[in-house]
Amino acid sequence: MASLDLNKTMWLYVLLMISCTKKNLSYSEQLSYKSINHKYLQQMALCKCLYYADSTLHNNEGSTGYFFNRTSYDPVVYDILDSLILLKKPKFRSLTGNKLGIAGCITLYESDTLKLEIEKMDRYLGAE
């Protein structure tokens, strides 16, 4: 009987060890402190860019604050992102006269330029 209890205990231990391996952690838990903060800043940049694309979002949407509150950056980054968006967002022209602000925001969000600029902001990143 004791042997059976020991086998159950061993199997329980093995299952517990397997379930706690890094591969079973969520995506955000596998990222480094910097990577998580970079991702939040990139998402914040997309939100801010969309605010510029549609001014009605600025008064009725709080997603920028949602992402900023999850970062560990100095608030000066908020102003830096504003400048960065205005300077680096592609300005597409529509043949039909339609706005293409969202296309520019998505292009900026996915760009290496934004990722490199965010990496430069690490000096404003608080300690882990």
Image: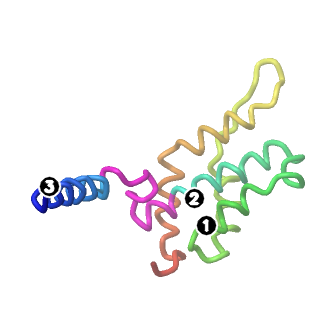
Mark 3 or 2, nearer chain start: 3
Q: Identify which amino acid the numbered label 1 is placed on.
A: Arg
Quick check: marks 2 and 1 in contact, CB under 8 Å? yes
Q: Is residue 22 shown above or below 104?
A: below
Residue assigned mark 1? 70
Residue assigned mark 3? 4
Nearer to me, 93 or 73: 73
Question: Is 121 situated left or right of 12 in this image?
Answer: right
Label 1 neighbour load within 10 Å: few <14, some 14-19, many 20+: few
Image location (x, y in percent) of residue 10: 16, 58
The residue sitting at the top extreme is: 96
Nearer to me, 53 or 30: 30
Q: Nearer the viewer, mark 2 or mark 1?
A: 1
Real-space CA distance between mark 3 and mark 2, rounded to the nearest whole angstrom? 50 Å
Question: Is 12 situated left or right of 38 in this image?
Answer: left
Nearer to me, 4 or 14: 4
Quick check: marks 3 and 1 in contact, CB under 8 Å? no
Q: Is residue 26 shown above or below 111?
A: below
The residue sitting at the bottom extreme is: 127
Q: Identify which amino acid the numbered label 2 is placed on.
A: Tyr
Magenta part of the protein: which range? 23-38
Question: Is 34 situated left or right of 81 in this image?
Answer: left
Q: Identify which amino acid the numbered label 3 is placed on.
A: Leu
Identify the mark at residue 123; answer none if there is no mark. none
Mark 3 or 1, nearer chain start: 3
Nearer to me, 124 or 37: 37
Identify the mark at residue 40; answer none if there is no mark. 2
Q: Nearer the viewer, mark 3 or mark 2?
A: 3
Q: Chief secondary structure of the magenta span?
A: helix
The residue at 66%/68% (across/down) is 69
Helix, strand or loop status at disc 1: loop
Mark 2 or 1, nearer chain start: 2
